Amino acid sequence: MADAPNASGTADPAHPAWPPTDESGPAASPTASPAPGTRTGARAAVPHAARHGGRPHAGRPTMKDVAARAGVGLKTVSRVVNGEAGVSSDTERRVREAITALGFRRNDSARVLRKGTTASIGLVVEDLADPFYSPLSRAVEEVARAHGALLINGSSAEDPERERELALALCARRVDGLVIVPASDDHRYLAPEIAAGVATVFLDRPPGRIEADMVLSDSFEGARSGVAHLIAHGHRRIGFIGDRPGIHTAKERLRGYRAAMAEAGLPVSESWVALGPTGSDRVRTDAARMLDGSGGAAPVTAVFSGNNRVTVTLVRVLAEPEWRGRPVALVGFDDFELADLLSPPVTVIAQDPADLGRSAAELLFRRLDGAEEPPRTLSRPTKLVARGSGEIPPPD
Amino acid sequence: MADAPNASGTADPAHPAWPPTDESGPAASPTASPAPGTRTGARAAVPHAARHGGRPHAGRPTMKDVAARAGVGLKTVSRVVNGEAGVSSDTERRVREAITALGFRRNDSARVLRKGTTASIGLVVEDLADPFYSPLSRAVEEVARAHGALLINGSSAEDPERERELALALCARRVDGLVIVPASDDHRYLAPEIAAGVATVFLDRPPGRIEADMVLSDSFEGARSGVAHLIAHGHRRIGFIGDRPGIHTAKERLRGYRAAMAEAGLPVSESWVALGPTGSDRVRTDAARMLDGSGGAAPVTAVFSGNNRVTVTLVRVLAEPEWRGRPVALVGFDDFELADLLSPPVTVIAQDPADLGRSAAELLFRRLDGAEEPPRTLSRPTKLVARGSGEIPPPD
DNA sequence: GCCACTTCTGACAACGTTGTCCAGTCCCGA
DNA sequence: TCGGGACTGGACAACGTTGTCAGAAGTGGC
């Protein structure tokens, strides 16, 4: 777990190690207290609170200051700021002047502490920069905005530990709800949070060892139909290159591949199947093995790709001189920008990331509005978009 | 301004209208108090605080509960949670057990209120889903993470009012710092915040009517060199299609275009220049006008595009049958994925969005760590990447 | 056995806001 | 002139945490 500074054997669910504590270094505590832990050092957590006399926002005017300046009571200022009724227009004017003069701005931390609600939701995805996740993020943001909430988000980088840190840090901030694209396969750590009222929706992949709402694309059916499409165009030896085997969508898509092959009565050589990281080196190696038959089995005539990162790499590999003379059919899971302008244009199984994000966020806010049904699963359909690369016939 | 619920003439800098107040409807207040404002309705701000008996996190255990259960004092729990020295290992064990048993998690709002620092920074960009801004966001996130801070971000959608709302909402949450890609050209509204100690860095575009740190790409020089590249390949009639004229980078790039043309002694017909929204209809119309000479001037033989959105649309337009037979040279500002696999591959002026984000965030944290120099401007270079589309010679 | 010292622990106030509740003030009609 | 109601304003406690400080418990030396 290697989590809390005091990692004394037991995990420390109360201290996610994210908002750094002040003991930012191996200094101090030569006592019996356990060592400050390896993490703190590795993180290079620089304490950046030292300016402005210790308290960064020190000297900011408070409602008290505004009240004094306007010559009214504290609560009156609060009423004005919150637009509550019961303030004469003259008083209101004086208060507003004081606010402007002092540059007052309400401190939402105090407000949250008092009210118990933050009007913010958290989102944890794999990588904010990935063209699949960024529109998804944006869609969640828009729904949040429509509900008057702010979005706090972070990237897990497919690291279960990092997902946990992030999610728990968000909970510590008391976000009202959480949308998570899981990197971990065990979410029991969230059980206390969910029990405490943090609405949680899992997106793109199901939660692990826990019951919760989820919104998924139909990966199995999408992959099955994509591979069936290749088969319908005459292919009998088809490769599958997907994401890491631990990832739910990768497994589902592989299952879809196998189902399509089985339905057509086609055998599958194990050297036609490759799961792993989406980095281009790995994909290139695996693709080369399938295409030149060096894996021991006959070379494939078509490839099904498990996600947009893999597809882009494959497009790149297939464009290399080595394969130029020999067109290989390709169908990829996930649509991507400019897929239609490549040569050949790439046939894809499209899912709509924005729609996924929107659906998840809307489900979340339904929960926040009080929907009490048991956890439900929403499955979003995929769509085959034939553009050319998937309709290339086998060479013979 | 249409801002606060009590929009009684004066703008209300203390109440950004974002975290919604409770008066979420035209109900109540039939009094002299001004109407609740158009905004609330238009926003469809649904109150989602009504579950769990009013307070969403009600019933969550606090340090007091943990202390009671462990049979220790409040402060001892705080010490354990924060890894402070001076707790016997036996006491610590009891406290940890209580924490786990109760599912306690520290409430960061209270912590923030007490400590004055939030360990979070805000980021406002144009559109989180844009392939230029998403890696930029991710880079800011990574730097924040390295400094132990969380990232709260939002999209302004190029709406100045929305930028203001977002930035002020972030300030109300007392983010330690702010990175802003401006949509507005007047940032005086931020002056009180900056004075109060919110470190602020402007990114990609300079702030308006205010002094502050900024990180910019060298748009002028990038555009100049791109257009010079086209000229060097024999073009004399070159079009420029850019973003909306209010946007700083659009103006700079246009200036670069004009400079390159002037340096080569080439005249510029005004119908060769088009600024506007990046939507494909507008771009298509303007491109068609330049290319077929219907604007009155002779048709252009090359086009320089002002950003990645425009470039992608242009690629699409130029791929249409109408222009297939007549190759048009193209150089675009901003690199984009798969640019090298199009036919022809697209020559671009590349900037590195991740580098921009990283630089801005690092500057921000230097400020937070106490750097007190006057505001500085960081200019990041661009790089011409010749791939083919920019080296197409003119037809004659 | 006692004192000085160290180590550990807890009571209390403060952070800035909002909800409750009571005390004024004003206007009106009786 | 007074009483009643409607409205306005303010004192106070509470939210959950951390910093201060003083007290309690344990330890070693004489």
Image: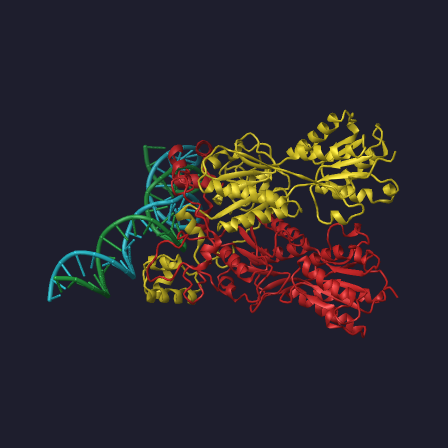
Chain colours: A red, B yellow, C cyan, D green
Question: Vertically, is A326 above or below B285?
Answer: below
**Location of residue B275 by image quarter:** top right
- Position of residue A318 in the picture relative to residue B115 (left or right): right
Q: Which residue lies at the image location 71% right of the left edge and 68% below the top edge?
A: A254
Whole-percent x, y for residue B304 in the image: 75, 36
Of the pair B40 and A253, the residue shown nearer to us = A253
Q: How many marks?
A: 0
- Position of residue B50 in the picture relative to residue B291 (left or right): left
Whole-percent x, y for residue B77 in the image: 36, 60
Of the pair B198 and A127, the residue shown nearer to us = A127
Q: Which residue lies at the image location 82% right of the left edge and 69% below the top edge?
A: A236
Whole-percent x, y for residue A149 in the image: 56, 49
- Position of residue A228 in the picture relative to residue B95 (left or right): right
Residue A12 visible from this viewpoint: yes
- Position of residue B271 in the picture relative to residue B181 (left or right): right
Question: Vertically, is A331 above or below B180?
Answer: below
Of the pair B78 and C11, the residue shown nearer to us = B78
Residue A85 visible from this viewpoint: no
Question: Vertically, is B182 above or below C13?
Answer: above
Whole-percent x, y for residue A292 in the image: 78, 65
Q: Quadrant of the C terminus of chain A?
A: bottom right
